[in-house]
Image (cartoon, rainbow, N blue to C red):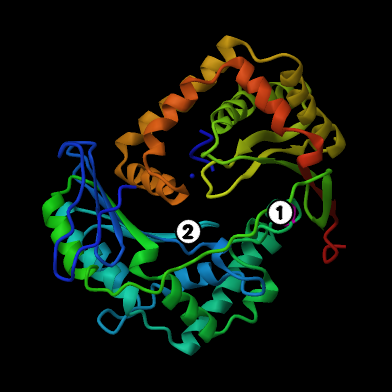
Amino acid sequence: MVLLAGLLALCGPASAGEEAAGTETVRADGAVYEETLPNGMQVFIITDRSTPLAVFEVWYNAGSIHEKPGKTGLSHLLEHMMFKGTPSHGAGSFSKMIKRVGGIDNAGTGKDYAFYFQKLAPDRLSLSVEMEADRMSNLIMDPQETLSERNVVMEERRMRYDDDPQNLVYEEVMAAAFKNHPYRWPTIGWMSDLKTITHEDLLTYYRTRYVPNNAFIVAAGNIDVDSLMALIRKDFGRIPSGDPVRDSIPEEPEQLGERRVFVRKEAELPYVFSAYKAPNILDEDSYALDVLSSVLSDGKSARIYKSLIDKKQIALSAGAGYSSIQKYPHLFYLYGTAMPGRPIEDVEKALYEEVENIKEEPPSEREVQKAKNQIESDFIMHQDNVYYQAMMLALFQMVGDWTLRDRYIDGIRRVTPADVQRVAKKYLVEDTRTVGVLIPVKNREAQ
């Protein structure tokens, strides 16, 4: 599903010690309880009585877009450091305590955010609340440990990007597609920046961005809202607000022509990644772009698979994708890996032909309805998973409003074949396209 790929009601201020009133429609399964603590931290709780589990997540406006030139990779490095312990809980003890009660924990960093989560029994949520609040304000940031973990991240970068040809192409395309917007640099950071990040850089970033008024909590599952809120008010409510975080994200200038980048790297097969500037989920056109991506690439009956892989047999793999759940406009993309002996130019040309076919004649009503049904069924099916419920609410909230989640399917249902044709003509044009091509070279050591 396109939406997965990939994947504000504020209460008035309350005086110290006073419980802020929350809001909800009905205290029932599926209801979303909302409350804003006096220190500015927002809380969202989804009740789901059908599951024996609960998920607790803390999200920070602390993704790679919040970094500065020359300091890329801070957000991801800080995610690693968040597991190094506090004066109350030593390094690694957080995860050990969660595992001891049968739960799991992890974290992630994206371009727009960083988040931390635990999945465990509802009666163990006090562990999550206590320890997440503790490391929000009391993280140990040892200088030597920082340098050691920085080396770990550098090695991770070598494995995930420097030694992965297709990821390297993606990274180069992003850097070329965005000239001014911070989406241009990788979440993991540039290697040259990672080498120069200091303990002071990381500590300043932590103290600036890991504050209650720059974060929110999402919990989901078989939860007693009153009991959980009492814990949250006690442990998170005592953390002082930080200085207001004012982000100034530069506007991306209009792209006036196709851009191309080439990556010469040891690889078996050539690869092409072609990306077009496209709006995010806040734009009505995003729904039609989601459906367009599904028509092109959702399964073996989709157009790209049938044409490039099944019929023409020129691509080993190929498809399309769309990054809609982002704070700012992002990309719609096409990609393909050539079959052995086939030129990558044939794959690229064939991908564009499938787009042009839709521009010339809209897909059939049946084709569009099938795509819409697939998107809707995937979306609804995943509502049985409390982790997915919490994740989707958080992602939409990070974009600007979690209630977009409830309007998403209505938006998909409104899409017509004419809409799909219209957005293909509007956004999938050569002048807003950035193309990355992998040119395989032989292994020099083997030679």
* Residue 188: x %, y % from top left: 59, 65
User: What number is the disc on residue 178?
Assistant: 1
Q: Residue at x 51, y 78 (%)?
A: 149
Q: Compared with residue 149, is residue 5 higher up or lower down, i.e. above or below?
A: above
Front position in the image: 293 or 34: 34
Q: Residues within 10 Å of mark 2 (few under 14, many from 20)?
A: many
Q: Residue at x 47, y 48 (%)?
A: 399
Please state the extent of the stretch shown in magenta in the rendering: 169-175
Tell me which amino acid carries mark 2.
Tyr
* Residue 309: x %, y % from top left: 72, 27
Number of marks: 2
Q: Compared with residue 256, is residue 351 higher up or lower down, i.e. above or below?
A: above
Q: Are marks 2 and 1 in contact (CB under 8 Å)?
A: no
Q: What secondary structure is marked by label 2?
A: loop
Residue at label 2?
113
Asked whether residue 174 is drawn in magenta, I would say yes
Residue 51 visible from this viewpoint: yes
